[in-house]
Image (tube, grey):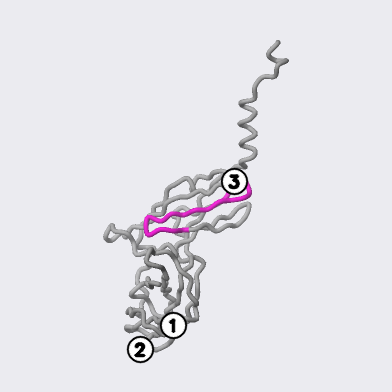
Amino acid sequence: MEFSMKGHDSGPINHKTQFHIYVTDRNKNSLHANTNDFKVRISGPRAFSPGVGKTPSGTYAFNLDPPVPGRYGIEVYHQDEFLFKEYFDAHDRKPESIETLTQFDMDGVGLKGGKVGETVEFAIKATDIRTGARADIYAQDLAVRLSGKSNLTGRVSGNGPFTALYSVTIPGYYYVDVLYQGKSIMEHGPTKVLFEDRASSNSTICLLYTSPSPRDRQK
């Protein structure tokens, strides 16, 4: 069983910053762990111990919400065994948000529509406008939501570019929105897409290719 952790190294006070703990085998396959086996100890200007929970994506996460500025130490334990220590610098003035420093580019069939019951996808690329490099954003920070005939949530995976996938079960028009930490990042608002019923589409194809009946051939 191997452990790793991802999160930001700085942020504003009185703001929850989420850290994710990954539990894998040597082949990087996800493994199950008991959330009660994890312990997180925060030291620094204030000492506290946030709880660890499991996320829908299968990682284990905790929130750091520093009340005062300063450097905080983050120690993580599993079954009382020390895993690693990281540091977080909390400041009292919120810096420019990461979404304003990031250029998001999206492209793919999933932004156009498709057939009911089929999984469609599109790519999300996040670039730091200051350096031109990949932005410091993770798949769990992103979300895909659909509204229309029904309200749905898609899945986002990858390390950048990211892949967003979703499917619908009812034909009609939908609006696809992409969010970063709960805020929409689509410059012109949600994209309108159309999903057609596969059954009606197939029946149309059958009509187009129906052979003439024997009686018609004799005419």
Horizontal side of 216 relative to 101 (left or right) equals right
Horizontal side of 101 relative to 189 (left or right) equals left
Q: Nearer the viewer, residue 13 or 211?
A: 211
SS at badge 2: loop
Picture residue at 61% right of the left edge, 46% below the top = 172
Measure the alpha-carbon separation of dots 3 and 2.
Answer: 54 Å
Q: Nearer the viewer, mark 3 or mark 2?
A: 3
The amino acid type of the residue labelled 1 equals Gln
Determine the image quadrant of residue 217.
top right
**Residue behind mark 3:** 116
The amino acid type of the residue labelled 3 equals Val
**Residue behind mark 2:** 45
Determine the image quadrant of residue 185.
bottom left
Above or below, 17 against 130 in this view is: below
Quadrant of the image for the N terminus? bottom left
SS at badge 1: loop
Report x, y in % for residue 57.
49, 65
**Residue behind mark 1:** 79
Point out the stretch of residues depicted in magenta.
156-174
